Image: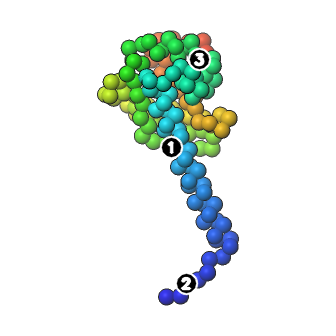
Amino acid sequence: MTRKPIGAAALLLASAACSSALAAGGDVAKIKLNWATFFSSKTTIAKKASLLENGAQFKAVLEAQSTSAYAQNSTASVSKVTLAGSKAMVVYTISISGKPFLQGLKGLALRVGGKWVVSDATFCGLLVLQGPPPAPCPSS
């Protein structure tokens, strides 16, 4: 069997495709980790604020939420991430005490300052399930 040499252009294209796939995989992993961290009852308010779009505006809301029965033993798991530039659609489940509570939720992750965060619209969408949204929520 005779091997044909790979041209420089083909090698560059293969290398670029590989780099792009690795970057996408890294972004997906970061989104999943940040999403799980944000929704974990064990995460500090300061850390949650850093993982939320406009998080500083939501510190009082995050503090109030931390004492709710729902937030006491909450976790989130991400089942799907679809990247689209600096945005990503996220399909996730929130569990309470290890049992799925809200399944198949759809949210938006945003790359802000090089870091993936939960969009404030996603967070506010969950807050609406408990009553009127707080003042920092964007108007829809």
Q: Which residue is mark 2?
A: 3
The amino acid type found where label 1 is placed reads Ala
The amino acid type found where label 2 is placed reads Arg
The amino acid type found where label 3 is placed reads Phe
Residue ID at (59%, 44%):
84
How far apart in space, not on screen, are marks 1 and 3 (Cα)?
25 Å
Is 9 or 82 nearer to us in this picture? 9
Residue 7 appears in view = yes
Residue ID at (55%, 84%):
3
Does residue 91 sit above or below 10 in this rendering?
above
Is 122 or 45 nearer to us in this picture? 45
123 sits to left or right of 79: right
Q: How is the image coloured?
A: rainbow
Return the x and y of residue 24 as percentages of the image width and height.
56, 49
How far apart in space, not on screen, are marks 1 and 2 (Cα)?
37 Å
For marks 1 and 2 on the same chain, the one whose residue lies earlier in the sequence: 2
Q: Which mark is residue 84?
A: none
Q: Which residue is mark 3?
A: 58
Q: Which mark is residue 29?
A: 1
Local packing at callout 3 (Cα closer than 10 Å; few below 14, some 14-19, many 20+) is many
How far apart in space, not on screen, are marks 2 and 3 (Cα)?
61 Å
